Every structure is written in C-alpha cells, then in structure tokens.
Amino acid sequence: NAGVMQNPRHLVRRRGQEARLRCSPMKGHSHVYWYRQLPEEGLKFMVYLQKENIIDESGMPKERFSAEFPKEGPSILRIQQVVRGDSAAYFCASSPGARGMNTEAFFGQGTRLTVV
Amino acid sequence: KQEVTQIPAALSVPEGENLVLNCSFTDSAIYNLQWFRQDPGKGLTSLLLIQSSQREQTSGRLNASLDKSSGRSTLYIAASQPGDSATYLCAVDGGKSTFGDGTTLTVKP
C-alpha cells in the first residue's frame, strides 16, 4: 500500500503563472487535507475535501487558490497568478475517516513551490 | 479557536539522554492528538497517535501521554540517539489538524 503521493516534489514558477499540485491519497482513504508550511513557520491548515466535495476551506486564501478532489484521479491544489509569497512547502494528508472516527493522518512528502 | 504551543522551541542534548517534549492546547474537546517527526526538507512521519479516550501510547523508545483536562501532551524519548535529531510536531484533532510550531531536537554524539 503506497503512502500518500504528491507530485511534483519541486516546482518552480515565475510570478503570474499557475501552479498545480497533485495529491493521491492512500488506498482506501477518501478524506484529503492540504496544508501549507511557509519558510520558518509551522503547518497551517488550508482545505479539507472528500470525494467531489469541499468540506472545510476555512484556511484557504480567498483569492487565487482553489482545490478539488474529483471522483476519479488525484486531488489538485491550484494556485493562479502566483506571487513570491506563495513560495512554501505544500503538504497533503489523507485519512480513512472523518473527525471523530479513525482520523490518523498520513502525510505525503510535500511539494516545494518556489516562485521566481 | 484551537491553539497549540510546543515548548521548548529548540533542544540540544548529548547522546544517551532521556528527554521530554511538551505540547499544550487550549481547547480540550479533541478527538485525538498525533506526534510527528519532520526532517529538514522532508515530509512528516507519524510517530504516535493518541485517541482522546487514551492516556498514553508507546512505540519503541517513544512514549506519548495525553491529559485532556489540562490540555497537555508530552513525548518522552528514551536513550536519545543522533538519528533522533529532527523537528517534532504535535497536531491536535486528526485530519484537520492544528499544529504546534514544533521542537527542533539536536542530539550530539
């Protein structure tokens, strides 16, 4: 059973371009979470998705950021018109159940986005 | 709003020493608490998960305790080794977790 897979591991984008980060959860997990870790800072929750639904996006910036978890395929975190302040490590986690159930979170290796 | 604090922010110890990392949280209505390890430039490795109904969990040289009423958890590392050098993070509540800023541990040979 492969772990949570994120790709690419490293992504370089010029200011104004779009960044697409992918996350494939562990097999059997239907709950996906995205976190951002800014340089020298802790992990901050961004968004929680189940298949085809956004459950909680309270940590998502209001503009330029969007996330989806389609019925088929990986979850995608999209950042439009990137700025230098978007440079960070973006981590994806998955779990087999929702809060209150077996919610041990398993994390991917992250995508390190650099905006130049 | 849940807030998680980890003390100390950094810790340096000689090899072989036993040590304790602390995690405190403001809202005791939690489902679980999870301890992670993060190596520089790497992802997070889950170390221990404590459900809210449990008091402690053990894995090898690691022991984590949970006191919900006081909003505290500790991670005890026995007989520390240089390979234990990393940042240790605690996260409260499961998938949508609130993380502390971590304790960076250095174990000197």
Image (cartoon, helix red, strand yellow):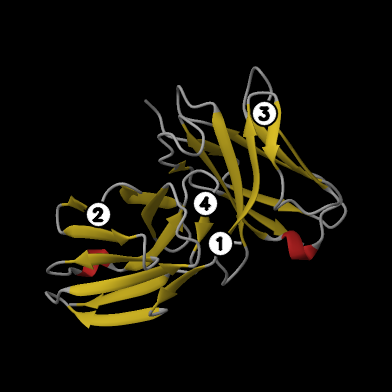
Camera-nearest label, 4 or 3: 4
Q: Which element type, helix, strand or loop, lies under badge 4? A: loop
Q: Which element type, helix, strand or loop, lies under badge 1? A: loop
Report in which chain the residue with disc 1 lies. Answer: B
Q: CA distance from mark 1 to mark 2?
A: 20 Å
Query: Which residue is the site of mark 3?
Result: A69
Q: Is residue B9 above or below residue A28?
A: below
Residue at 38% x, 52% y is: B34
Identity, as a three-letter code, of the amino acid under mark 3: Phe
Query: Which residue is the site of mark 4?
Result: B97
Image coordinates of residue B28 in percent, x first then y, are: 45, 59
Q: Is residue B57 above or below residue B82?
A: above
Q: Which element type, helix, strand or loop, lies under badge 2? A: loop
Report in which chain the residue with disc 3 lies. Answer: A
Residue at mark 1 shares a chain with residue at mark 2 = yes
Query: Which residue is the site of mark 2?
Result: B55
Camera-nearest label, 3 or 2: 2
Residue at 70% x, 34% y is: A54
